[in-house]
Image (spheres, coloured by chain):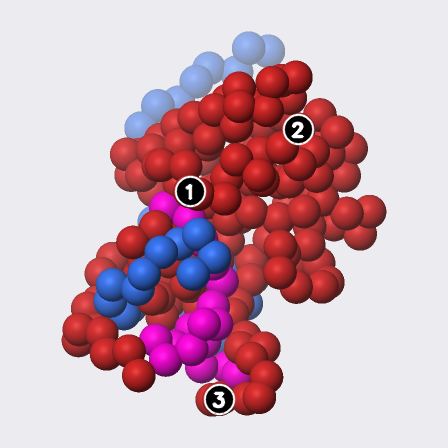
Amino acid sequence: MSGIGEPIREIEVLPIFLPGEAPAEVVPSPDAEPVESPAEEAPAERTHVYADPA
Amino acid sequence: MLTLPEVSVIPGPLVGVKVYRATRKGLRPLWHEGTVGRTQQARCLASPRRHDPEEAPRSDCLCGLYVYRGTRAADDWYELSCNASTVWTVVTLWGRVIEHRGGWRAEHVRIEQLVCSPTAEWIVGLLAESWQVPLLVVPAHPDPWRSYQAHWRRIADLVEGMRLSPLHLLPSPSQVS
């Protein structure tokens, strides 16, 4: 069979891709739940104050 | 009708080798007209129609995207190696898959690495840049046997490298220069 030999079995292979690496035809649903990003957390309280060089 | 064991679900994607021809319009499959994109989905072209074309591959048909395992040279690799327009690609594959002794018939395929001779570099280089896929140019050897060995060993190394590396450690296409 065109160089790949005899069939053995049928399998279902799960795709595992990084975010942003998904194949072109896989389009995220527009109404998907937003994912909370750690970058959106409140900034840490400032503990150091630097003197004005002027 | 061929009867195969019950369907198993395995994590993927799998890694193999798919072969094309370089043309002025892009990469053409070996057995069909037209050109392909980086990511492809199987569609049955059998005539007369035996089943829904979107249900490809099926064990009772010959349809699907044909992929070699790539760690051993297949019987027809010698002839392919002698043709300067042959383009070898290392691909990931997933979805419905019929596993064969020397490869697979897959539902989905994505090109991850391009390999060609210097003759085909002008067109394959444009595709590599457009798709942001790495390109390896393997010099042709005057001795066809040595060309064949050089090709399949380099390809086998690339396939093994991708299989051994956890996929999350592979560079994303946008990170490959």
For the view shown, which residue lies furthest in the top direction? A53
Give the Cα separation between the discs numbered 3 and 1.
29 Å
Q: Residue at x 25, y 57 (%)?
A: B11
Q: Amino acid at mark 2?
A: Ser
Q: Residue at x 32, y 61 (%)?
A: A6
Q: Residues within 10 Å of mark 3 (few under 14, many from 20)?
A: few
Q: Amino acid at mark 1?
A: Ala
- Residue B10 in sight from this viewpoint: yes
Q: Chain of mark 3?
A: B
Q: Residues within 10 Å of mark 2 (few under 14, many from 20)?
A: many
Mark 3 and mark 1 lie on one chain; the one further toward the N terminus is 3
Residue identified by numbered label 2: B117
Q: Pinpoint residue A49: horizontal percent, then vertical percent.
A: 39, 22
Q: Amino acid at mark 3?
A: Arg
* Residue A51 to residue A37: above or below: above
Q: Residue A38: which numbered mark, if any?
A: none
Quadrant the C terminus of chain B occupies: top right
Q: Residues within 10 Å of mark 1 (few under 14, many from 20)?
A: some
Which-is-in-front pick, marks 2 and 1? 1
Is-magenta flag for residue B64?
yes
* Viewer-closest of B20 and B13: B20
Badge 2 element: loop
